[in-house]
């Protein structure tokens, strides 16, 4: 039976090019989760879409992070993709998963 998982990958970027890379990478990570039999949820792909929340607005960014952390409560595992490092936001997700006793798995892809 597939697991419900939260997928962690970098989102925040200093440039548009880096943001584009992070989004392509996150989509590839989600695909990897599906291929491995997991059903992923990635709040940083959902909530940051145009017209949903503004990641450049600190209050809205916080709201998106908190909403994602609430979804984590129904997940069986947190899957962390590390090809581009672990950001502060990812670290918060990892810490929360460990604190709440969820499995944390680390994975790599070839960089996208």
Image (cartoon, rainbow, N blue to C red):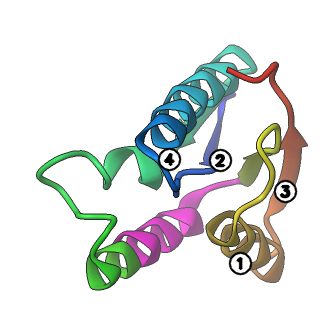
Locate residue 102, reporting x and y percent.
79, 65
Q: Which residue is mark 4?
A: 42
**Cβ–Cβ under 8 Å for marks 3 and 1:** no
Q: Residue 85 magenta-drawn? A: no
Which segment is the magenta one? 64-76
State how far apart marks 4 and 2 are (Cα).
9 Å
**Cβ–Cβ under 8 Å for marks 4 and 2:** yes
**Cβ–Cβ under 8 Å for marks 1 and 2:** no
Q: Which residue is mark 3?
A: 104
Q: Residue 66 magenta-drawn? A: yes
Res 96 label:
1
Which of pointers 4 and 2 indicates the residue nearer the eye? 2
Crowd rating for badge 2 (residues with CA inside 10 Å; few <14, some 14–19, many 20+)? many
Q: Quadrant of residue 96?
A: bottom right
Compare marks 3 and 1 and give the one earlier in the sequence.
1
**Dominant secondary structure (helix, strand or loop) of the stretch shown in magenta:** helix
Which of pointers 1 and 2 indicates the residue nearer the eye? 2
């Amino acid at each position: 039976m597939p697991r419900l998982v939260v997928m962690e990958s970098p989102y925040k970027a200093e440039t548009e090019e880096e943001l584009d890379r992070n989004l392509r990478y996150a989509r590839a990570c989600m695909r990897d989760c599906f291929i491995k039999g997991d059903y992923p949820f990635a709040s940083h792909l959902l909530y940051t879409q145009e017209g949903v929340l503004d990641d450049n607005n600190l209050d809205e960014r916080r709201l998106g992070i908190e909403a994602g952390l609430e979804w984590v409560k129904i997940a069986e595992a947190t899957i962390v993709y590390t090809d581009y490092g672990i950001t502060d936001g990812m670290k918060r997700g990892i810490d929360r998963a460990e604190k709440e006793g969820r499995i944390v798995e680390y994975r790599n892809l070839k960089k996208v």
